[in-house]
Amino acid sequence: MLEGRSAVLVIGAGPAGCAAGITLARAGVDVCVVDRASFPRPKTCGDALSNQAVALIRELGAGPRLDADPHALVRRAAAVFPGDLRVARDYAEPGWIVPRLTLDEALREALEASGARLLQSVQVRALELGAGVAEPITIVGDEFHWRAPIVIAADGPSSVAWPALGRSKPRGRTLAMASTAYYEGVAFPAGPEVADHYFELDLPHGYGWVFPAVAGLSNVGVYQRDDAYRRAGHRLPAVLDDFVARHPERFASARRVGAIRSWPLPVGGVGPVAERGVILVGDAGGFVDPLSGEGIWQALFTGQQAGRIASEAVEAGQLGAALAERYERTCTKAIRRPSRAKARVQEAMTLFVNHGLYRSRALRGILQWGYAHGALEHTKIV
């Protein structure tokens, strides 16, 4: 039985958990981070990093490892409509494609270098909240028993914090689903540093992507809002297979390497994200872009902000209402409010495709203007 206590316990050592742990350790706080996996480990993901996510990764100290390991740069992106009609934009600062095995190991190294404790292969099963905000939380798992006044939940969808806080799982409009696989031999007619996002009739409230190759392998996937996916009645791997089959111009000479993997993405609907000594970050807080499915920048940002709030809470002796409300306001301004706007853009993009409005040169011009000015990607540096 592994037992102990710390001023803050962080559950999950992905991007959100590492950002929180590094921020707390740099502030001199006694912080312990636990993860059910043993690193290095792969993680199902689209592997895309916005340039603002890269900037945060450098701020957290993981930049040199990221530079040294295999990656691809994204200097241009395109929204692709039926008939191969394209609306493209260039990035002054490129985005990156980095496999999660590489990214999470770089962040793990930065976490341990910061002085935070990391316990690997620890499965947390439940949180037992105290009767008052100043009472420690008991964290229990397989051969694990810990006490901490503050817990940062960075354990993704179906977080152990949700039942402890009385949360239900997101569904319908507040949940999205994605499937991804790696392919070698994918064609890139518009250039090897272009990320293509396909908006199609068969992917309402979603899109398919083809990303630049890293070490010869391209991350290819599909993303859809949960209610739209369920109405179609297809299994997620079949949705990806159908997307690939619709694009022989890209995949005629391609071969899938490994299995198709699917995962849920909460895009809201988890309620308050800071209360009773618990702070939700990343996917556990529903902080995923509802239009693009992007979650790495949101994970890094909320993890960093939660670390700052938790540091102040440790000094104050509790996560009081004022600190909890400040975290809520920060997340609302930076993520929730823009995400509500992005959800409306998603609705508009579905109508744009379903009614064939992409055929209008004038409407494509309006979309081109909005895309070029970052209207579809609020976490990009332009």
Image (cartoon, grey):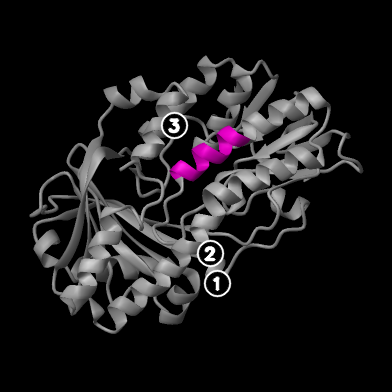
Dot 3 and dot 1 residues touching (CB under 8 Å) = no
Residues drawn in magenta: 296-305
Residue 94 falls left or right of residue 60: left
| Residue 144, image x, y percentages | 73, 32
Q: Amino acid at mark 1?
A: Gly
The tag on residue 172 is: 1
Q: Is residue 32 above or below residue 42?
A: above
In the rendered view of the protein, which quadrant contains the N terminus?
top right
Disc 1 secondary structure class? helix
Label 3: which secondary element:
helix
Along the line of sight, which residue is nearer the eye, 95 or 16?
95
Residue 56's disc is 3
Q: Residue 175, labelled with which disc?
A: 2
N-terminal of the two: label 3 or label 2? 3
Q: Position of residue 8 (x, y in %)?
A: 72, 28
**Alpha-carbon span between mark 1 and mark 2:** 6 Å
List x then y, in percent, for residue 290.
46, 61
Quarter of the view holding residue 368: bottom left
Percent x, y of residue 267: 53, 59
Task: Tell me what residue is drawn at x 42 percent, y 56 percent.
Answer: 293
> Answer yes or no: do the residues labelled 1 and 2 have beta carbons within 8 Å?
yes
Taking 159 as reference, is 165 left or right?
Answer: right
Main secondary structure of the magenta stretch: helix
Q: Residue at x 19, y 57 (%)?
A: 88
